[in-house]
Image (cartoon, rainbow, N blue to C red):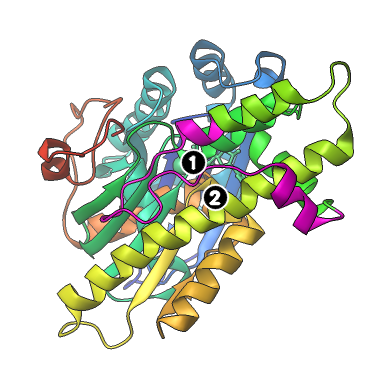
């Protein structure tokens, strides 16, 4: 490998992500340049099971992690000696996979005498907007992924306030389970979106398949999605037996997406009002950031764009490849923590649960997800 001379004032971090069903490795520099970013999806390994199987995920991470790390270092044209730190997701997530990524990261850190940084996967999603858009703290975040649905305020690196969370299913989980009920292949979210876009008569779809908008109109910013999934099931049970008609499915998918958009608009509206009141003295331009895999959904992006336009706020939706799980977000979180000397000792443990705002867990309605 050829060595690229490093600019002395810049720091370079290797980031490793293995918390779910993507093995991802990237190298990112402190000026925000992504030197490499490799993602290997395990989609085909889990497809037959209709969801992620933890044991299969852990084994697949183990099979591919070395190759991805080698590839990411080659793409960045760097040697391990050139790195300033190694960052790896340390939770929350599937413990077997998290341990694979952490062990690989720790081994490199130990062998090359580099600092190791254990990254909270949710924090990495939350900080991505500072990689793509260089925004200042504080800002409001809607994090919507397969395992999490939260409204957070990022006050600083390591300092988050959780204002809302799901009291049952995560939004991505609701997309995936509803899509499965509709007979759509895994992963459900993007396939459900494709079906919704094919809906021919949108007015008729909403009349024929009305769905509940859980917690809409209530105070606060918590979410609930299990009732929505149940209502989808009930509609499907009423359809004629046999093969599901694609027009029926696209109408139901359309109604589902509109309902999800209504719920997100309502919940975010409350959080925005609170944010504007709480931080009006500190922020010149208030900003809402959307992140997590579900943020790839075009309808959801449009709803949030319209809402923030009406509130005269900035809206940031990172590019798709940085919204879903990736190594660049882990490396960037590493850059942010390294700048603040927030490094970890090599005995840091993997954490299946790791809330960003531990105090929120203790409040009534604090939710059940990490
Ligand atoms: O953040 P992510 O890649 O993984 C974690 O859960 O951490 O999010 C994956 C989730 C899945 O539930 C997937 O179905 C959903 O994001 N998703 C979508 C879309 N693309 C991915 N949901 C709705 N519309 C999409 N276009
Ligand atoms: Zn994620």
Residue under the image location 59 percent in, 28 percent down: 177
> Which circle marks residue 260 in the picture?
2
Q: Is residue 230 above or below residue 68?
A: above
**Secondary structure category for the residue under label 1:** helix
Q: Quadrant of residue 168?
A: top left
Alpha-carbon span between mark 2 and mark 1: 8 Å
Q: Where does the image place residue 82, in percent across and percent down from the top left?
A: 40, 53
Mark 2 closeness class: few <14, some 14–19, many ≥20 residues within 10 Å: many
Residue 44 seen in render? no
Q: Give whichever of discs 2 and 1 has the lower sequence position.
A: 1
Quarter occupied by the C terminus: top left
Label 2 within 8 A of ligand 1 by Cβ: no
Near mark 1 (Cα within 10 A), the count class, few <14, some 14-19 or many ≥20, is many
For the point 55% across and 27% down, which residue is it? 230
Q: Position of residue 311 (x, y in %)?
A: 40, 81
Q: Report the number of discs.
A: 2
Question: Is label 2 in contact with label 1 (beta carbons under 8 Å)?
Answer: yes
Q: Is residue 223 magenta?
A: yes
Q: Secondary structure at mark 2?
A: helix
Please indicate, yes or no, whether residue 212 appears anywhere in the rendered image: yes
Q: Nearer the viewer, residue 188 or 3?
A: 188
Q: Point out residue 351 in the picture as x, y percentages from the top left corner.
A: 26, 27
User: What's drawn in magenta, residue-wise?
Assistant: 200-229
Left or right: 35 as drawn, with respect to 333: right
Residue mark closest to the camera, 2 vs 1: 2
Q: What residue sits 24% from the left and 55% below the top? A: 337
Residue 304 lies in the magenta stretch: no
Residue bearing the label numbered 1:
171
The kind of secondary structure the magenta stretch mainly shows is loop
Q: Is mark 1 within 8 Å of ligand 1?
A: yes
Percent x, y for residue 323? 53, 53
């Amino acid at each position: 490998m050829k060595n690229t001379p490093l600019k002395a004032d810049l720091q370079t971090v290797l980031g490793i992500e293995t918390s779910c069903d993507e093995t991802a490795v990237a190298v990112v520099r402190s000026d925000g340049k992504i030197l490499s970013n490799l993602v290997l999806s395990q989609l085909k390994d889990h497809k037959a099971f209709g969801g992620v199987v933890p044991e299969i995920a852990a084994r697949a991470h183990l099979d591919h992690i070395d190759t991805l790390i080698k590839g990411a270092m080659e793409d960045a044209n760097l040697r391990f000696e050139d790195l300033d730190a190694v960052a790896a997701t340390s939770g929350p997530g599937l413990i077997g996979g998290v341990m694979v990524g952490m062990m690989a990261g720790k081994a490199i850190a130990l062998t090359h005498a580099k600092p190791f940084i254990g990254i909270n996967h949710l924090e990495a999603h939350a900080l991505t907007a500072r990689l793509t858009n260089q925004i200042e703290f504080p800002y409001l975040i809607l994090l919507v992924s397969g395992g999490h649905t939260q409204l957070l305020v990022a006050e600083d690196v390591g300092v988050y306030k959780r204002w809302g969370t799901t009291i049952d299913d995560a939004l991505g989980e609701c997309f995936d389970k509803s899509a499965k009920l509709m007979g759509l292949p895994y992963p459900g979210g993007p396939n459900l979106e494709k079906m919704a876009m094919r809906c021919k008569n949108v007015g008729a779809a909403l009349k024929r398949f009305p769905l509940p908008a859980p917690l809409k109109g209530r105070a606060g910013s918590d979410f609930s999605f299990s009732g929505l999934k149940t209502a989808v099931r009930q509609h499907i049970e009423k359809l004629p037996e046999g093969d599901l008609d694609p027009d029926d499915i696209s109408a139901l998918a359309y109604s589902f997406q509109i309902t999800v958009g209504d719920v997100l608009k309502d919940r975010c509206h409350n959080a925005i009002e609170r944010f504007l009141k709480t931080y009006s003295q500190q922020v010149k331009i208030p900003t809402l950031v959307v992140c997590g895999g579900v943020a790839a959904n075009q309808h959801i992006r449009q709803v949030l764009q319209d809402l923030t336009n009406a509130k005269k706020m900035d809206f940031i939706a990172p590019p798709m490849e940085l919204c879903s799980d990736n190594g660049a977000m882990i490396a960037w979180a590493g850059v942010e923590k390294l700048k603040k000397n927030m490094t970890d000792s090599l005995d840091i443990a993997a954490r299946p649960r790791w809330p960003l705002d531990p105090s929120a867990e203790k409040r009534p309605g604090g939710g059940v997800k990490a």
